[in-house]
Image (cartoon, rainbow, N blue to C red):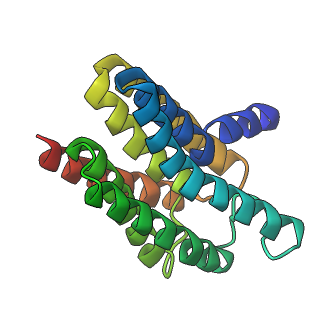
Amino acid sequence: MRKFATFISIIGHPLLTIPLFILIVMFGFNSIQKAALISFLIIGCIFIPVILWAYIKSKNGSYTNFDVSDRTQRKSMFTFAVPLLLIVTVILFATHQSINLCISVLFALILLIISQITNLYIKSSLHVSLNVYLSTLIFTLSYGGGIAFLLFTGLISWSRVMLGRHTIKEVFAGAVIGTAISLTMLKFLS
């Protein structure tokens, strides 16, 4: 059961699920040139630096693990990731990208900032909050796909508790944050 939980936690990691979603959507709905540019901007300027940051910090012992499961260690991760996402958000708005893209990235930034503030009190699950948010983005493109991914997010929630990375309370906090941000974002997109 633990191996299955580890597998789900790995394939459900937001540093994997979100870039994959970005590539699928960008190359599915845009010209190759625009898709490559936006994908590079988001993945190359946010996700790759965050992945390298977490990898280096976990290898040198600053982080207990790649997931940055320690609440006090997460402070530096947020301090690194939030400015990157802010810069990319500003660039997307300044270059007049599609309003849906700009708003989606803006609300991802808001989700991360709220998670950073919440981290002062509880280590809410970023796996859960970001994947709930991603479920909503998928839902705007495919009702069935969104429901399926939301169900997968339930499995991710289970895996995080099973592996001892989060308590039920922390997973619930992540779900609440992801749901609240998702519902607010949908109001702006409609």
Q: Locate residue 50 relative to residue 107 in the image: left or right.
A: right
Q: Residue 135: percent from the left, percent from the top? A: 39, 36
Residue sitting farthest toward the top: 144
Residue sitting farthest toward the front: 33
Name the residue located 74 percent from the left edge and 34 percent from the top edge. 7
Q: Residue 81: percent from the left, percent from the top? A: 55, 68
Q: Residue 113: percent from the left, percent from the top? A: 40, 71
Residue sitting farthest toward the right: 60
Q: Locate residue 139 relative to residue 46 in the image: left or right.
A: left
Choose between 117 and 36: the one closer to the eye.
36
Name the residue located 34 percent from the left edge and 17 percent from the top edge. 144
Choose between 176 and 95: the one closer to the eye.
95
Is residue 131 among what the camera can see? Answer: yes
Q: Which image quadrant is residue 115 in?
A: bottom left
Q: Residue 153: percent from the left, percent from the top? A: 50, 37
Q: Which image quadrant is residue 10 in?
A: top right
Q: Quadrant of the C terminus?
A: top left
Q: Quadrant of the N terminus?
A: top right
Is residue 64 among what the camera can see? Answer: no
Name the residue located 51 percent from the left edge and 64 percent from the top edge. 124
Q: Which image quadrant is residue 77 in?
A: bottom right
